[in-house]
Amino acid sequence: MNSNFKNIFLSILISTRPKQWTKNLLIYLPLLFSVNESWQFSEFSSLQLLFIKTTIAYIAFCLVTGAVYIINDLLDINHDKLHPVKSKRPIPAKSIGTGPAIISAIILFISGIIIAYFINIKVLAAFLFYIGLMISYSKFLKHHLYVDIITISLGFVIRALSGALAVDIPVSNWLLICTGLGALLIAISKRRAELITFKNHPTIQRPILAKYQISKIDKIIPALGIITMVAYTVYTVSATNLPDNNFMLATVPFVGYGIFRYVWIVTVNNKGEHPEEIWFKDLHLLSTIILWVIFSLLVLVFGRN
């Protein structure tokens, strides 16, 4: 009995795709960029409270996204059974039954929504919008060219916005735009990698791949990279929550290198199907992300007049 419960629990946990929880770290972004505006390092008790609220929002979002992944696997179960990798997931592999999977998704949804409600009503609204958007994606939006990746990028924007709403911090529109553009770059890069991997039978991976063309994607990816870098540059000199001495421009090279490094990995190495693995396995990219965070904090803390 205990062994059976353990197997079901592990199957549910795997179905929530813990590796994808790294995407939810975007929730912390507004807190990072509001230092010395909405909070001070010297006010430790205030910072501690904001960090706890943000972390609670992060946990709640992980619960909700986990439920979304379970629902997605349930809706795609017949298609995933034919996939060489997805067929090994607990739901298509029948390691867990449909009933327990549905119950688990409901419990995760309700738990995340209840936590969001107790954070504040705005976070609840953001969560409900995200759930509706992702269920719509799983049902029909993912079958429409470009609509699928735009929907995915909007999900990233909601993550960042939820972080701001959780601690009642004003967030720059440019920061949300940069988040959306970066997510769009990641999403279309994933489509390219999938086309490379399943070039003979693209519909095995996902039906919409038949409508994508690598020749067009290879034009879109570098263009998106440049647009994202330009948007971030504009953000560093125009956002009211940043130092008005433009010191934040010092972080642009890190963002630029990170973007072009990712584009190189995707277009030359033909990777990108699992972006969450690239972020942590590519030392150049990981180092760039860490340095960007450090330099951003230094500018935000010490760069104000």
Image (cartoon, grey):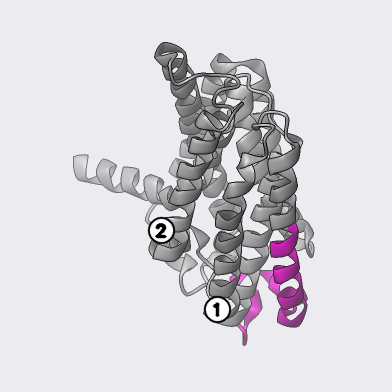
Asked which secondary structure carries label 2, the reply is helix
| Magenta highlight on residue 203 | yes
* Residue 287: image location, x then y, percent: 42, 57
Q: Quadrant of the N terminus?
A: top left
Q: Is residue 170 above or below residue 269?
A: above
Instruction: Depth check: give the residue in front, 118 or 279.
Output: 279
**Neighbour class for label 1 at 10 Å: few (<14), some, many (≥20)?**
some
Q: Which residue is mark 1?
A: 270
How far is the residue under mark 1 from the one under mark 2?
17 Å
Q: Residue at x 54, y 66 (%)?
A: 80
Instruction: Depth check: give the residue in front, 149 or 183.
Output: 183
Q: Which residue is mark 2?
A: 280
Q: Quadrant of the C terminus?
A: top right
Q: Quadrant of residue 273?
A: bottom right
Earlier-in-chain disc, 1 versus 2: 1
**Neighbour class for label 2 at 10 Å: few (<14), some, many (≥20)?**
few
Asked which secondary structure carries label 1, the reply is loop
Image-based side of 303 in relation to 294, left or right: right
Instruction: Depth check: give the residue in front, 236 or 265.
Output: 236
| Magenta highlight on residue 149 | no
* Residue 300: image location, x then y, percent: 55, 32
Image-based side of 12 in relation to 63, left or right: left
Dominant SS type (magenta): helix
Q: Is residue 49 above or below residue 247?
A: above
